[in-house]
Amino acid sequence: MTSLLLAIIYMAFISLGLPDSLLGSAWPVIYQEIQVPVSWSGMIFMIISLGTVVSSLNSDRLTRRLGAGKVTAISVAMTAAALFGFSVSHSFLALCLWAIPYGLGAGSVDAALNNYVALHYASRHMSWLHCMWGVGASLGPYIMGAALTGGHVWNTGYQWIGLIQVALTAILFVSLPLWNKAGQKDAPDKHDPESARPISLKEVIALPGAKSVMLCFFCYCALEQTVGLWASSYLVIGKGIDEVSAAGFASLFFLGITIGRGISGFITFRLNDTQMVRLGQSIIALGILCILLPLGDGAAFFGLVATGLGCAPIYPCIIHSTPAHFGADKSQSIIGIQMASAYIGTALMPPVFGWIAGHLSIGLFPVYLLALLVVMVIMHELLGRKTAKRC
């Protein structure tokens, strides 16, 4: 039964990644059809991000009341409904409205699934599950491309992925008894009002190590998203590399993350979560130095791949170590604020570098990444010290 449920969770992680890259891949067609400036995709992205922050911060309350299985099933159903909403939208306002349930659903399922896996499965499964997210994120643009090259409109791509989400929703609702059985041992004690009470945001932030892990996640996701958004531009403008080559090598960063998470699952047989995070941070430092130093184009390309490989274990291993750092009774609350911090870093810091690139120099790209890495390393080490007694 445990293996069957794990297979369903793997499917859920693939499904979680499927819609994440759809807007970017379809936007060159969408903005022309609805006749808005190309930059307006950022508004839709911000609405989705705000929804994920809100639902992540409320994940503890929802999961305590409904259980991880129901939260996951309902969240995927909300995402499916939002995708079908996108598939019938032909105006910018409609896209913004459907972005609300999409963001709310995505944040809830992300926090609930991550906490459930952290509590019930070994670290290797967390790495492999986030590798599955990468598979889904890679398949999304492929499905959209297949729809467009097949003579369909962009709405059809959203419809196809919406159908996949509907099928997964049905599987999740059928599988609810498996979730309930596996989660009984971690359910709050109904006879202990204190353990059953949702933890307030103020109480969570006051926990030793909470601020450190929030900043650690903020910096990690800021670094990952900044590389994803600006690497190609840096190679073209800062290094003088042609656009086609730059785009191809920049995409290797995401390939490095996906493959790296597959490999990380095997390395966790030898190293614990803290050692995996430190290993990833060391590889990121090597990658950034290769980009920063005047060692030629080959070194810059290698640096991007190495940065992706280094990023691979950090996100899943910090999440997996959350129950060990803070306790199983508080892990859902902590993972909720981790997810919220991640989304804020993702939404805020890449535009900050855009301002730096426009007003100072895009050549500061590796310096910016290095600064984020340094803060991330410091915060992770502080997390370990402040929660050492519990670990």
Image: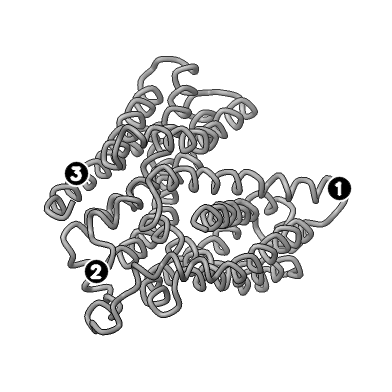
Residue type, mark 2 in image = Val
Within 10 Å of the Cα at label 1, are there few (<14), some (14-19), or many (20+) other Cα atoms? Answer: few
Residue ID for mark 3 = 381
**Mark pair 1, 3: CA separation:** 51 Å
Task: Identify the secondary structure beneath mark 1.
Answer: loop
Residue 249's disc number: none
What is the quadrant of residue 265 in the picture? top left
Query: Which callout, 2 or 1, points at the residue further toward the start of the chain?
Result: 1
Residue ID for mark 1 = 150
Question: Mark 2, mark 1: which one is toward the viewer?
Answer: 2
Residue ID for mark 2 = 204
Q: Residue at image x 45%, y 78%? A: 66
Task: Identify the secondary structure beneath mark 3.
Answer: helix
Residue 53's spot in the image, x, y percent?
A: 42, 66
What is the quadrant of residue 11 in the picture? bottom right
**Mark pair 3, 2: CA separation:** 19 Å
Is 217 drawn above or below residue 185 in the view shown? above
| Left/right of residue 363 with respect to residue 327 in the rendered view | right
Q: Residue at image x 16%, y 60%? A: 208
Residue type, mark 3 in image = Glu
Residue type, mark 1 in image = Gly
